[in-house]
Amino acid sequence: MHRYDAESVRGGEPSPVSRDFAVDGIDEALLGFHTRLRSEPPRVLRVRAVDAVPDAVRTVRLTAGPDLAVRAAEGEAEAELPGPADRLCLAPRNRTAIPRVTGDPALAAL
């Protein structure tokens, strides 16, 4: 992330984020940072890195208590964020826009 930010500041297009690094960054965001969010009633969000197989799908359950993120497409999701791994890594950190949202856009914004 620091490299991306430094390259953004200097101007021009930052170097690409590798797919494997991006998938790791998605996990960091969903398994670490998202646990600060709370939702009542519970909501389900799916993140799908379309260019990273296997382990390309994460399901996040936001609740009033501890949240849960799993590396699978489990159950119905109210919103899904499909896109390239690098964009899905950068978007939760406000470096790029969410590539695409299906379902409830308010849940994606949360």
Image (cartoon, rainbow, N blue to C red):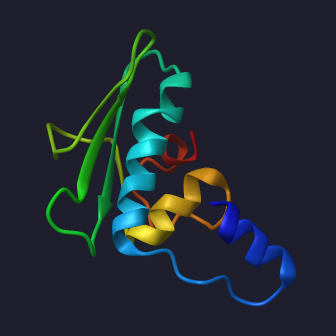
Q: Is residue 27 left or right of residue 50?
A: right
Q: Is residue 91 left or right of residue 45?
A: right
Q: If the image is split into quadrants, where does the N terminus sit?
A: bottom right
- Residue 99 seen by the camera: no
Q: If the image is split into quadrants, where does the C terminus sit?
A: top right
Residue 100 position (above or below residue 37): below
Q: Position of residue 59 (x, y in %)?
A: 27, 41
Farthest residue, direction bottom: 12
Farthest residue, direction right: 10
Image quadrant in which you'd find residue 44: top left
Image quadrant in which you'd find residue 25: bottom left
Q: Is residue 20 left or right of residue 36?
A: left
Q: Position of residue 80 (x, y in %)?
A: 34, 53
Which sits in the foreground, 66 or 43? 66
Which residue is at 36% across, 59% downward?
A: 23
Figure label count: 0
Residue 61 position (above or below residue 95): above
- Residue 83 seen by the camera: yes
Which residue is at 61% across, 66% downward?
A: 97
Farthest residue, direction top: 65
Which sits in the foreground, 98 or 11? 11
Q: Is residue 29 left or right of residue 66?
A: right
Q: Position of residue 5 (x, y in %)?
A: 74, 67
Which residue is at 42% across, 40% downward?
A: 30
Which residue is at 14% across, 63% downward?
A: 54
Residue 85 position (above or below residue 40): below
